[in-house]
Image: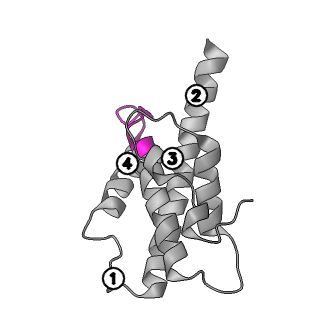
Amino acid sequence: MTTVTSEDDAPDVEASGSENSPVDLETINDSVEIALAVVLAMPDRSQIDTTTRALIGHLELLLSEDLGYDEDPVVREMYQSAYRLLDLTRRPGAETTHFGAYEYMRDLARLTRRFAGAYRDLNTEEHNDG
């Protein structure tokens, strides 16, 4: 498991949010693991915010992939949940409590993990069929 100790060590947010970037499941998994790691103390706010930005980039990248929205009602619900969670009015701001920002980051990580799993499953099926 990778841990982030400062903003300098955070996963590359710029690359993960670009439409032209390939999906890097290892980087996505690292961000999810950071957000969901069991710790004795809550991370500081700057680490929460850095991880949240990385997860937003990863989730936006995964949303651009065709994961079967039209065919699968479970996937459709995942997309609806993602759009609700990514709504700018729901994102933590300076006035959000530390715990509120932490919970948002964890919600984002859990949903990103589901999308990464769906992406992995779909691409595994395609490679096995090909």
Q: Is residue 1 left or right of residue 92?
A: right
Q: Amino acid at mark 3?
A: Phe
Pick whichever of labels 1 and 2 is earlier in the sequence: 1
Judge whether 32 appears above or below 93 on screen.
Answer: above
Instruction: Mark 3 or mark 4: name the one nearer the start of the chain.
Output: 4
Amino acid identity at mark 2 = Asn
For the residue carrying disc 3, how many other residues have a C-alpha within 10 Å: few (<14), some (14-19), or many (20+)?
A: many
Q: The N terminus appears in which quarter of the rendering?
A: bottom right
Which is more toward the observer, 80 or 3?
Answer: 3
Helix, strand or loop at label 1? It is loop
Which quadrant: the C terminus?
Answer: top right
The type of residue carrying mark 1 is Ala
Q: In the rendering, which numbered label is found on residue 114?
A: none
- The residue that mark 1 highlights is 94
Residue holding disc 4: 79
Pointer 4 and pointer 1: residues touching (CB < 8 Å)?
no
Which residue range is magenta in the image? 61-74
Task: Write down the residue under mark 3.
Answer: 115
Side of 25 where 111 appears, left or right: left
Indicate the position of residue 52 as horizontal and vertical percent values: 47, 65
Depth check: give the residue in front, 92 or 3.
3
